[in-house]
Image (tube, grey):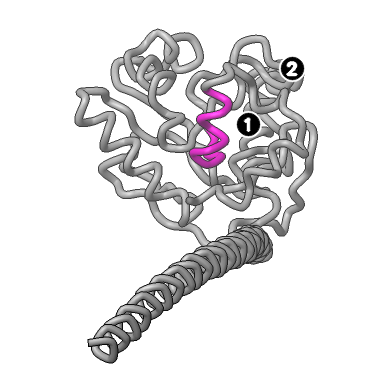
Amino acid sequence: MWILGGIVMILAALMGWGAWYGYERYIALSTRVDILEADIATTTHRLQRGIDETHTTLSSALEEEQEKARKLQTQFGTISDTVDVLDKLRTLDGQLLKKYSKVYFLNENYMPEELATIPKEFTYSDNREYTIHTDVLPFLINLLEDAKEEGVELFVNSAYRSFDEQAALKGQYSVVYGAGTANQFSADQGYSEHQLGTTIDFMTTGLNGQLLQSFDATPAYVWLQQNAYRFGFILSYPKGNAYYMYEPWHWRFVGQDLARTVHRDNKNFYDLDQRDIDTYLANIFD
């Protein structure tokens, strides 16, 4: 019995020690797990922060590169536009927007690079041929067709005139009206807008030869005042101009952009600074 009791006591002691040892291991393992979880959380936080910082850095770098690309694109576009403008100016006649009429002079050898004949259906007289700068003709035809569609009778009564033709015409006016009167409404040769090939004298029906006195009282003139700018034409010599007498029939092509500006601001072409006018030259036929 004594031996059996000793064995029981030994087994109980072993079991107690095993339980205590298991508990200690459990505590140690639990502590280790907590430490590992804390380390993992710290490491994860650091990694996430690093990723966020890297993302922020990469985003900033990407934005910087995108901004550089936009600037380069803008600069390239500006350079490209400038090259286009310079190329246009290289091929355009630099006289097209100059202020003639006692300001600039066209010599006897000047004429437009190319002239086109105005169709007879748009001319007031069937007995002669009228020509105009080739690039202006489409704008003129559109103007005349638009007027016709709106029931307005509008025709071409004069267009391109050479240096010699202007000299002969001025001579005739001087004989008929006297030199002083002729100078009020007719340019000397070399100073006429008609020599540019971009200028039209319009006519309408029912005037009975009274163009000077009556054209501005016609529906044709009212229509031109309201619509000519849409096709690139402006009235060269309105009332009160400092160059010639009022000529409501005399309209010059200056391009749609400039014509819109003159119309919108209610300005006279000849009152504008030539440097401002020249900025419209590159787009005159656009």
Which is more N-terminal, label 2 or label 1?
A: 1
At horizontal 40% and vertical 44% (from top left) the residue drawn is 139
Residue type at mark 1: give it: Gln
Residue range (magenta):
252-263
Front residue (pair 43, 55)? 43
- Amino acid type, label 2: Ala
Relative horizontal placement of residue 265, taking residue 150 as reference (left or right): right
Report helix, strand or loop for mark 1. helix
Instruction: Residue 242: give its label.
Output: 2
Which residue position holds label 1? 172
Residue 86 picture location, percent across and down? 68, 62
Between 36 and 193, the residue placed more toward the observer is 36
Query: Please, is residue 276 above or below residue 161 in the view?
Result: above
Extreme residue in the front direction:
1
SS state under label 2: loop
Disc on res. 80: none
The picture places residue 246, in percent across and down from the top left corner, at 60, 15
- Number of residues whose C-alpha sits closer than 10 Å to that of mark 1, classed few (under 14), some (14–19) or many (20 or more): some
Residue positioned 78% across, 32% down in the render:
102
Report whether 118 appears left or right of 149. Answer: right
